[in-house]
Amino acid sequence: MKRLILMLLVMVAFAATADAQGFLKKLKERAVNAAENAVTNKVDKETNKAVGDVLDGKSKTDNSGDAADATDTYDPQAGAAKSDFVRGSAVMFEDNMQGEQVGEFPSKWDLVRGNAEIATIQGKTCIAFLADDSWISPLVKGGIKNYLGDVFTVEYDMLYKQKGGADPDVELDIMHESMERDHELFTIQHHFHYDRTGVSCDYVRPTEQSWDHKEGNSRADEVACVNDGRWHHYALSFNKRAIKFYIDGKRVINVPNAKAGAGWITWFVGHGTSENPVYMRNVVIAKGAVDLYERKATDMSAVEKAIAETGKFVTNNILFETGKATLKPESMEEIQKVADYMKKNPSARFEVQGHTDNQGSDKINDPLSQQRAEAVVKALEQLGCDPFNMRAVGKGSHEPVADNNSEAGRAKNRRVVFVKK
C-alpha cells in the first residue's frame, strides 16, 4: 500500500513538472512574438513618418547639410523659459516693418551709408541690407543722439543664409552722442564665418577717459548656428556697467564692467549684396534692463564697492578752504575711509586726482587742483598709507562731469577721484 501511494506521488510530481515546463515554454513564445510585433510596429511608424515628411516637403537634412535641429530655431517661449533677459519696461522705439512698401527705404530709419530697402522673405516684411558698407540708424525722438542713457535693452531678429563668397560683417554699435561711426562706446560683432558661429564685444573700460578707446574684449565662439537661412532672435541689455548679449534666449556675452555714456545706436553691415543680403526685423529699444548683479556682501565699504565696480572712487566729501589747498576738518572722515581701503589692500596703487569747477582761470585752477591732490596724499600718508602707492595729479576744470552754469553742477565738478592703477 505504501509503495502504491509513493508511485502515485511520483507520477503527480512528474505531471506537475511537465505542465510547468509547458507553461513556461508558452510564456516564452508569447514574449518573443510581442517583441517582434513591437519592433515591426516601430519600423512601420518611422517608415510612414519618413514617407509623409517627403510628401510634405520635409526632410531631416537638406542638400546643404543643415540639420533640422529645434535648438537652432528661434522659439520665443522656449527662449524666455531659459533666459534671464527681460525687456525694458518703457519702449522708446519699435518697428515690425508692417505696412511698409517693398522696395522703399524703411520709414522709421535713417540712412548714413550704403543701401537698405524693405523686402519680404519667407512671407515676412523686413529690412534688407543690400550693399557693402551699409549703415542705418533708427529715428528716435526726431533723430537726436542722446536717447539711450545708462539702462536699456535692444532686441531684433536677423536672417542670413550662407551662399558662398565673402560673409557679411554685421555690427550692433552703441555710440556716445559725440562719436561717429568706427568710434563706438561698445560694439557687438556677429561672426558668420563658420558652421557654428559666434559673437564678440569690444568695449571701453570704465577707467578710460575717452569714449572710443575699446581695450576691453569678450568673445563667444561657436555658440549658435545663425547662418542657416532661419530667423534668429538677438537681445542686448546694458545696465549702468554690465553688457549682456543673447542669441535665441541664450546668454553668450557677459561683461561686468564697461564705460557708461550710451547716446544712440546703429546697425552696420559690410560685404552685403543684393545676391547675399542680411535681413532684419522686429526691432525694439526700451528703457530698463536685466537686473544688475551685485555681490551679496554686507561688509563691503562704499570705497571698496566703487573700486570693485568701476575701478575708481569719486567723492565730493573732501572739502577745501575756498581758493586754497587747505583741507577742512570735516574732510577727514572721508579720507579715513580711503585710508582703510588702502591699508587693507597694500599692493593697490592709485592716481589721486584733484578737480575744480570753472570759476577762475586755468592759470589758477590747474596748480590749485595739483596742490589739493597733494594735500590729500599727504593726509593719507599721515594715516599710515604708503606714499609709494599714490601719485597726485591736478586736473583743473578740464574734465567736468556736470554743467558749470549752476551751483549744483559746479559742486559736482569740485571732486577728488581715486583711480586704481
Image (tube, rainbow, N blue to C red):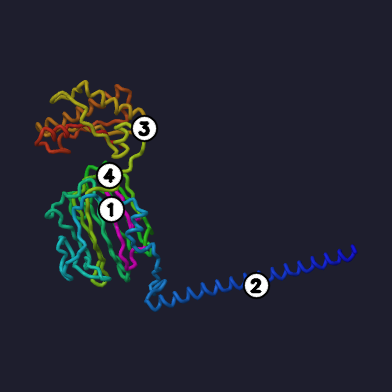
Q: Amino acid at mark 4?
A: Arg
Identify residue for label 1: 236
- Quote the CA–CA distance across marks 2 and 3: 81 Å
Which of labels 4 and 3 is toward the front?
A: 4
Q: Are marks 1 and 2 in contact (CB under 8 Å)?
A: no
Disc 4 element: loop
**Residue 322 within the segment the image draws in magenta:** no
382 left or right, relative to 106: right
Disc 3 element: loop
- Quote the CA–CA distance across marks 4 and 1: 13 Å
Give the x, y percent position of residue 281. 24, 63
* Quarter holding residue 226: bottom left
Identify residue for label 2: 29
Q: Amino acid at mark 3?
A: Ser
Identify residue for label 4: 241
Disc 1 element: strand
Which of labels 4 and 2 is toward the front?
A: 2
* Quarter holding residue 272: bottom left
Which of labels 4 and 1 is toward the front?
A: 1
**Residue 233 within the segment the image draws in magenta:** yes
Which of disc 1 and disc 4 is earlier in sequence? 1
* Quarter holding residue 388: top left
Q: Is residue 379 above or below residue 8?
A: above
Q: Is residue 307 above or below residue 74?
A: above
Which of disc 2 and disc 4 is earlier in sequence? 2
Q: Are marks 3 and 1 in contact (CB under 8 Å)?
A: no
Which of disc 3 and disc 4 is earlier in sequence? 4
